């Protein structure tokens, strides 16, 4: 079993995940979720995860099952995302 060490984060909701081959033909898992790098839980407002403080972002993570490497990329960093939907 391969273990992946990601930077500390909090994921409010995961949107989707699947397996595919990358450009080198290696098997990867792609995972989309609403991640925050902030670990301060403060629930004194109606939607804390949409605040500037938490700022959960629509994030794509790739896990390479052959090399053990991972990539993490934020899409639309200026927009906080709470509950993604898949079309």
Image: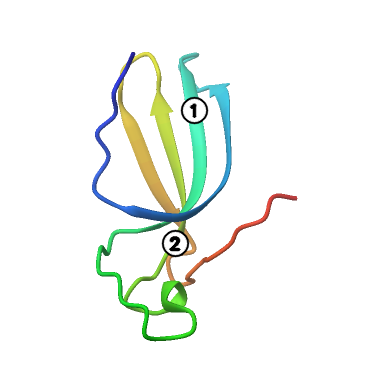
Answer with the quarter of the image where residue 62 lies: top left
Give the vertical position of 42 relative to 87 (above or below).
below
Vertical comparison of 80 with 62: above or below? below
Question: Outermost residue, right direction?
Answer: 87
Marker disc for residue 43: none
- Label 1, secondary structure: give it: strand
Mark 2 highlights which residue? 57
Residue at (30% x, 52% y) in the render: 9
Which residue is found at the position 42% from the left and 77% from the top?
48
Residue 82 point in image, percent of width and height = 53, 66
CA distance for labels 1 and 2: 19 Å
Where residue 23 sits in the image (x, y, percent)?
50, 22
Q: How is the image coloured?
A: rainbow
Q: Residue at x 48, y 84 (%)?
A: 46
Position of residue 5 measured from the top left corner of the image (x, y, whole percent): 24, 34
Measuring from the top left, give residue 35's x and y in whole percent. Answer: 40, 56
Which comes before the other along the chain, label 1 or label 2? 1
In this image, 83 relative to 38: left or right?
right
- Count of numbered tags: 2
Residue located farthest toward the bottom when viewing the structure as drawn: 45
Helix or strand or loop: what does disc 2 sit on? strand
Q: Where does label 1 land, which residue? A: 29
Task: Please tell me which residue lies in front, 24 or 18.
Answer: 18
Crowd class of label 1 (few under 14; some 14 to 19; many from 20; radius 10 Å)? some
Instruction: Tell me what residue is drawn at x 36 percent, y 37 percent.
Output: 71
Quadrant occupied by the N terminus: top left
Of the pair 10 and 25, the residue shown nearer to us? 10
- Please report contact status of discs 1 and 2: CB closer than 8 Å, yes or no: no
């Amino acid at each position: 079993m391969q273990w992946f060490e990601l930077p500390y984060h909090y994921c409010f909701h995961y949107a989707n995940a699947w397996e595919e081959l990358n450009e080198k033909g290696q098997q990867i898992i792609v995972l989309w979720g609403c991640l925050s790098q902030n670990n301060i839980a403060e629930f004194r407002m109606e939607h804390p995860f949409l605040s500037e403080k938490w700022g959960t972002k629509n994030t794509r993570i790739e896990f390479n099952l052959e090399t053990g490497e991972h990539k993490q990329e934020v899409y639309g960093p200026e927009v906080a995302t709470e509950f993604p939907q898949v079309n």
